[in-house]
Every structure is written in C-alpha cells, then in structure tokens.
Amino acid sequence: MSDEHKTKVLLLDDEKFLVEMYKIKFEQSGYEVSAFFSAYDALEALRKGYDPDVMLIDITIPNSISGYEFLEMIKKEGLSRYSLKIALTNAGQDAEIARMAELGAHTHLLKANFVPAGIVAAVTEMLKTKRSS
C-alpha cells in the first residue's frame, strides 16, 4: 500500500494487550491504525471527522457503551457510512450476530478463532471484495 493513502482502521476494544497485537500486525501490513479503548472516545473521533475504511468493534466494552450501542449511534448519526464494520468479538450466538448485522455490521469475526495475523488477512480479503463490488 502506498503511503499516500493508507487504509485506515479504527480498532475499538478494551483489551489493551490484544489491541497492541492487532495494531502491530495491521501496521506491519501497511495499515494506519487508530485504537480506542472506549466507545465514547471512538465516537468523539468520528464526530470530529475521522473516517476509517474499516472498523473492528468489540461488543462487550466495560466502562463504556457496548459495541451494539456504538453501532446504533454511528448509524443514527450517519457517521462513517462507507466504512466496513466488523464485529470482532467472542459473542457468537445467532441472536447476537443477527443484532450486530441489524445495526450495520457487515460481518463478525470470533476472536477465539483467529490469531492477529489471521484478522489482518480476513480484513484485507473483505476490503478487496468490497472494493471490487
């Protein structure tokens, strides 16, 4: 990827260790990453004009609004309409997946099923598919 337009990734998760691992892997693959540990902080950045190409959103975020509420708010406020929204979570029940989709998540990835490099590979593939459609 060229330096002129790096693909921007918004990473929202409260697990600092995981966020750091994902951030390193994405940056090694040429992505520009903005990590947030609180949905409030991520919302504030979006409201100020930050427009990522991809959002990886955890659903359960202690001391913050949930990923569900975050998705609901960005949808309601019309923020980052064209971002690829991916729920990156360990919530994998059918009802949870359906609710995430209803709120605008394009897909979900179960954290337990991926190493960080696998998340990067999956996101890269999804972006290719989205851009070619």
Image (cartoon, rainbow, N blue to C red):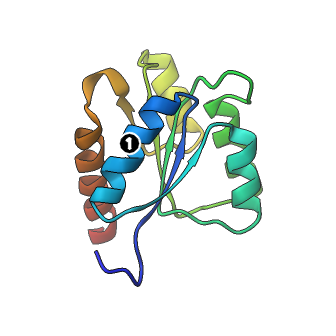
Q: How many marks?
A: 1
Q: Residue at x 25, y 32 (%)?
A: 115
The image position of residue 55, as x and y in percent, is 50, 50
Q: Residue at x 51, y 59 (%)?
A: 83
Q: Name the side, left or right, on which 91 lies relative to 43.
A: left
- Identify which residue, 84 or 33, lies in the foreground: 33
Q: Residue at x 69, y 39 (%)?
A: 39
Q: Name the side, left or right, on which 40 lies relative to 101.
A: right
> Does 10 appear above or below 71?
below
- Identify which residue, 79 or 118, lies in the foreground: 118
The image position of residue 94, as x and y in percent, is 43, 18
- Identify which residue, 47 or 72, lies in the foreground: 47
Q: Residue furthest bottom?
A: 4
* Quadrant of the image containing the N terminus: bottom left
The image position of residue 24, as x and y in percent, is 36, 49
Amino acid type, label 1: Tyr
The image position of residue 48, as x and y in percent, is 76, 65
Dot 1: few (<14), some (14–19), or many (≥20) neighbours within 10 Å? many
Let me know if residue 78 appears in the view. Answer: no
- Identify which residue, 107 or 121, lies in the foreground: 121
Let me know if residue 53 appears in the view. Answer: yes
Q: Quadrant of residue 2?
A: bottom left
Write down the residue under mark 1.
22
> Does 72 appear above or below 9?
above
* Quadrant of the image containing the C terminus: bottom left
Regarding mark 1 in the picture, which secondary structure is present there?
A: helix
Q: Name the side, left or right, on which 50 lies relative to 115.
A: right
> Does 126 appear above or below 112?
below
Q: Residue at x 27, y 56 (%)?
A: 124
Q: Residue furthest top?
A: 93
